Structures are given as C-alpha cells and as structure tokens.
Amino acid sequence: MLREVMRHAEGLLREAGIDTPELDARLLTGAALGMTREHMLIHATARLNQPQVARVLGFVARRVGREPVSRILGRREFWSLDFTLSPATLDPRPDSETVVEEALAGVADRQASLSVLDLGTGTGCLLLAVLSELPKATGLGIDRSEEAVETARANARRLGLGQRARFSTGDWASGIEDRFDLVISNPPYIPDADIEALAPEVTRFDPPAALAGGPDGLDAYRTIVAQLPGVLKPGGRIIFEVGFGQSADVSALLRAAGFGRIGVRKDLGGVERVVFGHLDA
C-alpha cells in the first residue's frame, strides 16, 4: 500500500545518506503518483499497482544517485513562483532571493516604469521575481546558453510576464545598447579548484559554466564591472550575488570602477550574499 511504499522509499534515502529522507520521499512519491500531500494522507492505505511502484522507486533511485529533487521534478519554487529547470540552467537557491530583496528595497516607487538587466539569467528567476513585484517594470535577461534563454522565455510566458521580459543570448553586457535603471547578476563565482569539493548534487547536475569563476572566483565580476558604465543609467544600481568571503573583493572592484554607495546584504544564514553599488551621476 501507499504508506508502505513511502516508508520503503524513506529507508532507501536514509541509507544512502540523504539529509532529508522523509521530505524527499514524500515529494518524490507525490510527483510520481500525481498526488498532493493531502491526497496521500487520505489514501495512505490505498494499494498501488506495479507501474506506480516502479515509478516511485525510479524517482527514488535517481535521488539515491544524488540527483536533486528539483531536477527530478523538473521544477523549483523561487520567490513563491514556479520555475521550470533545464540541464543548461542553475538550480535556483533560496539564498539568491537576497538579490530580489535588495532590488526591491532600493525601489522608492513600485509603480515606476523601471528597466532591469539580468546578466547570466539562467531560468530567469531573478528577473522574473523582480518583475512580479514591479508591475510597470520591463527587463532583459542575457545568457550564453540558448537552451537557458529558451527555458527563461518559457518561464516568463507561463508566469504571465512574457510581455515585459525579453531574453537573448550574449556575452554578459557586451553589445547591449540600451541603458537600464538596475542590473542584477548571479555570475559563476566558485574558484575553479574548489568545484570538485562541492556536493554531488551540484557537481553532477548543475552546468559547469554556471559554477566556474576562474582561479579566484572573480573573473565574471571583473568583466561585468568593466561593462557596467555602458549599460547603467546615471544613478543606476548594480546588485551582485557573491560567494562566501567574496563581498570585500567585489566591493573593491566596484569602488575602483567609480561606483558609490556600495553596501552588502546578508542572506538568512548570515552570509554576506549580495554586494550593491550605484553609478553616481
């Protein structure tokens, strides 16, 4: 019956060393059977047929192989919005919501017709989360991967934001002629030598290009900071996500490029996750 299958799934995940075996077993079982949590509770004693059991165990086997639940389901919730993933996109993390928080904190009038540029857009989660809160804002998301761009476009359409969000392939801000009120970016920032030590869920399933930040993890920041004066309006803001221990270095890059009012914002774990600055008029 359903309850026994879930218990078996939980046991397999616990034995494999998965941190949240009960939660993962419930999510994977529900997805495999097309059931909500409430439905599974009501029908806990229902008998499953062989194809149903096989589908549940197939999902569990993938998780035992350290594939993230979000990759198995093909979706991730971010800023209370539902995003489709693809192999070419980073799996959005809750820490990245700190970028959205800082973006909104700096907007005096949420009805203003602001323009937003998202560099390294991936699923489009940062740009689309910001646009969802700013009803008259428009945005452009750039990514090197055409597959990522197509994924972001599909997410925008599904979330009802396709009329206000454009997506295009590109090399960071190179060749962009428009000027923007706000630039946001979560670039690759893992030092190349540190990637192998990351969790298997990251190293095996996130695209390497979205992780590798060069010898010190700062290569993308150097490139983007040099391009910012050409894409930001006077007085415009840049908001970067940064890795652990990188806030001082990224702040220094902005300061050396003439940016002012530089600051940091911590994520819920107390890590300095965001660096922001203004292109003074």
Image (cartoon, rainbow, N blue to C red):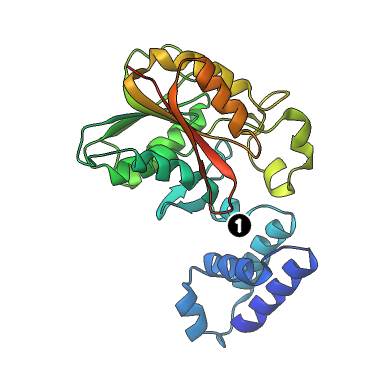
Badge 1 amino acid: Val
Observer able to see residue 224: no
The image shows residue 147, relative to residue 224, as above or below, that is: below
- Image quarter (top left, top right, bottom left or bottom right) of the C terminus: top left
The structure residue drawn at horizontal position 49% and vertical position 20%, both measured from the top left corner, is 172
- Image quarter (top left, top right, bottom left or bottom right) of the N terminus: bottom right
Q: Is residue 196 left or right of residue 27?
A: right
Numbered marks: total: 1
At which x and y percent is residue 249?
Answer: 62, 27
Dot 1: within a 10 Å radius of its alpha carbon, few (fewer than 14), some, or many (20 or more) residues?
Answer: many
The structure residue drawn at horizontal position 57% and vertical position 88%, both measured from the top left corner, is 45
Q: Nearer the viewer, residue 60 or 206?
A: 206
Give the residue number, with chain letter if any, for mark 1: 69
Q: Residue furthest bottom?
A: 45
At which x and y percent is residue 87?
Answer: 58, 39
**Residue 44 figure quarter:** bottom right
The structure residue drawn at horizontal position 34% and vertical position 46%, both measured from the top left corner, is 158
At which x and y percent is residue 113?
Answer: 21, 32
Query: Which element type, helix, strand or loop, lies under badge 1?
Result: helix
Q: Is residue 246 left or right of residue 42?
A: right
**Residue 140 figure quarter:** top left
**Residue 101 figure quarter:** top left
At which x and y percent is residue 72?
Answer: 59, 54
The structure residue drawn at horizontal position 68% and vertical position 79%, both measured from the top left corner, is 7
